[in-house]
Amino acid sequence: MKRLLFTLLTLSLVGTTFADEGMWLPSLIAGRIDDMRSKGFRLTAEDIYSVNKASMKDAVVLFNGGCTGEIVSPEGLLLTNHHCGYGAIQSHSSVEHDYLTHGFWARSRAEELPNEKLYVRILVRMEEVTDRIASGEQPEALIRAAEAEGTGYKASIEQMYYGNQQFLFVYEQFDDVRLVGAPPSSIGKFGGDTDNWIWPRHTGDFSVFRIYADRNNRPAAYSPDNVPYRPKRHFVISVKGIREGDFTMIYGFPGNTQEYILSDAVDYVVNRADPDKIAIRTGRLDLIAAAQASDPALRIHYAAKHANIANAWKKWQGEQLGLSRTRSVETKRQCERDFQLWADRHPEYAGLLSAMKAEYARMLQPYYAYEITRETLGTLPTAYSNEERSDELFERCRPTEQALFRHAFASYAAYCPEPYRIPEFLDGVAAAGSTEAYADQVFDGLWQRTDTTAIVRLDKAKKRMLNHITWLLGTTSLRNPTSKRLNELYAHYIKGLREWDTVRAFYPDANLTLRVAYGTVSGYEYADGEYHTPQTTLDGIIAKDNPEIYDYDIPQALRDLYASKDYGRWGISVDGRRTVPVCLLATNHTTGGNSGSPVLNGRGELVGINFDRTWRSTMSDIAFDPAICRNIAVDIRYVLFVIERIGGAGYLLDEMTLR
Ligand code: ARG
Ligand code: ASP
């Protein structure tokens, strides 16, 4: 009843308050601060971002170019997700020291493990340079000058609003980052792919690192002489917990969103790209899962591959469901009609939408061919390494690998539109007699290394076709080729949108630059009559625990702690039972790259580490719906509980500031 009342109250508030949509540039956060304070933030814009004094930004790091991390001690101790530190943890693991399975805890500084190629970046400053570039200054010169300002400085110029604004970002990059601790995968990856993108969630998705610097506290390549980095700022940790309705803020590096795209593009994603890419991946996952079920060694061999394929596969399904359920295409169409009525009276914008729609009509087919090619032929190995071949498992993988070839060839033939089919592929099929025969022929040559020229030839032809497509689109970017012309039109469109809609709060799409998102701890109406509360506990882990199911087989130590209820200072009382908090749900607008981001309370204290979103929330990359879009974080108290009670590494807590 209390819950229902709460939901009704929140619903009645929607419309009068701002939605929690938005990823804001820290240097411009002053423009949001009143709204933030009305929601419970107690600090100032200067506390979030300042170039003159230490601010929160000095404690946030871009972790290895794709995740976020936060500094939590005066000695450079760093928290991020387990799935972000996974590569590092794996690289130190062997059969004798299986840190992935059993976890790892450095018992002293000397035991902290260096990682080749792992780096973090801390933002020194960001500055708008639109006018300077417009008046003739060269971007490269700006970057060079900024990089000359300090040791290890890296700079880049990033486009906001499709290039309407340009910002210079200056970072300090640290290349000596050492592994300090990681929970066993049965905690750090608890729930695995089954629970991925799902709430309620019980994953202890965290790992611990430390930044090292030279004796002058400057970035340096790894050296045994390096010492722990002394940050300008570290986050204080709140152990008091957080409750539904409390303010939360996420400070991190969201990677990529497309909030302003036209209905044409959303329609393409929902009705064409997502369904076909999902179907193709379902086929691959079925083949891999069958192999895994048949052989325990293959289950491990294919674990990382399966997880990778399944992550986006599951995300797209949620995105498709969320976007169709909220009728995003129709909503956008209506918005475009309204914009057009306004544009008809503004000659500068009158023909814009039809020009954009014409460009979509021209480019969507080749773009689709591009996506299909990448999802099919683009997933095939062009060589099996000597390491793989010397593995005694190699022969046992053969039927699966061959089946994956057949599946990729068949899917390519079925989905890739006619004019973008690779001529060499068609010739190969014709000569072999069938797509399957051609797949077998190419595969056999590669597997036995009798004729690897066939796969090399196909690979070259594939690259030629992809290049041809990006040429058609007018861009050279192979990673994410949207058309160059479309990009220019979008820049103009955003300008128009901002003139037309003076009420909406605009924010630039995510582009792996530092952002602030804020909202509140909040559950949501999962289904009619089914409200999901925003906090999970150890009891939920115990309820899922099952030694027979790999994803749910928890460490014995956790079972023992549950049995003895020996939770120490981490125990909380929920409806009269003793338990430990595990994960949190909130309304912050996040995306890929926000993994590992600090979740902060109104005082700027760390209350959690962000790591995921709920399934249907993944639509927030394209359209944020405040009713269903939620981010998922691991409660910092669970992190500390695992470090202390499971890892026996309570000494790490001594260097943190707990409040
Ligand atoms: N869905 C989260 C994010 O995109 C976590 C991914 C890692 N976990 C997994 N089971 N694959 O990236
Ligand atoms: N799991 C994502 C990441 O790794 C976060 C998200 O997409 O919500 O960054």
Image (cartoon, rainbow, N blue to C red):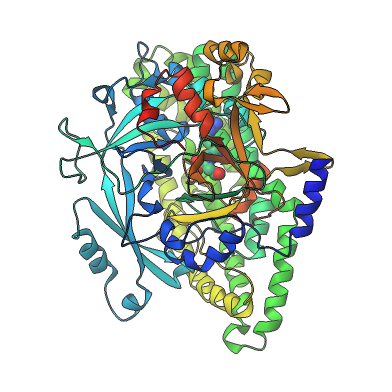
Is 500 rendered above or below residue 161? below
- Taking the spot 56% from the left edge, 65% from the top edge, the residue there is 34
Tell me if 619 is positioned left or right of 44 in this view.
Answer: right
Q: Position of residue 416 (x, y in %)?
A: 58, 48
- Apparent side of residue 75 relative to residue 625 in the rendered image (left or right): left
Q: Is residue 619 visible?
A: yes
Give the mark count: 0
Residue occupying image coordinates x 43% and y 57%? 48
- Name the spot of residue 222 as percent of width and height, x first: 20, 35
Q: Is residue 435 left or right of residue 615?
A: left
The relative height of residue 306 versus residue 480 in the rendered view (above or below) is above
In x, y percent, where is residue 168?
Answer: 34, 65
At a point 32% along the width and 58% down the height, the residue shown is: 53
Task: Indicate whether 369 appears above or below 412.
Answer: below
Left or right placement of residue 373 versus residue 540 in this view: left
Compare residues 230 and 332 and report the one nearer the observer.
230
Q: Nearer the viewer, residue 524 or 508?
A: 524
Image quadrant occupied by the N terminus: top right
Quarter holding residue 95: top left
**Residue 617 position in % (x across, y down):** 65, 47
Is residue 433 visible to us here? Answer: no
Nearer the observer, 222 or 556: 556
Name which residue lies at 22% across and 50% down.
152
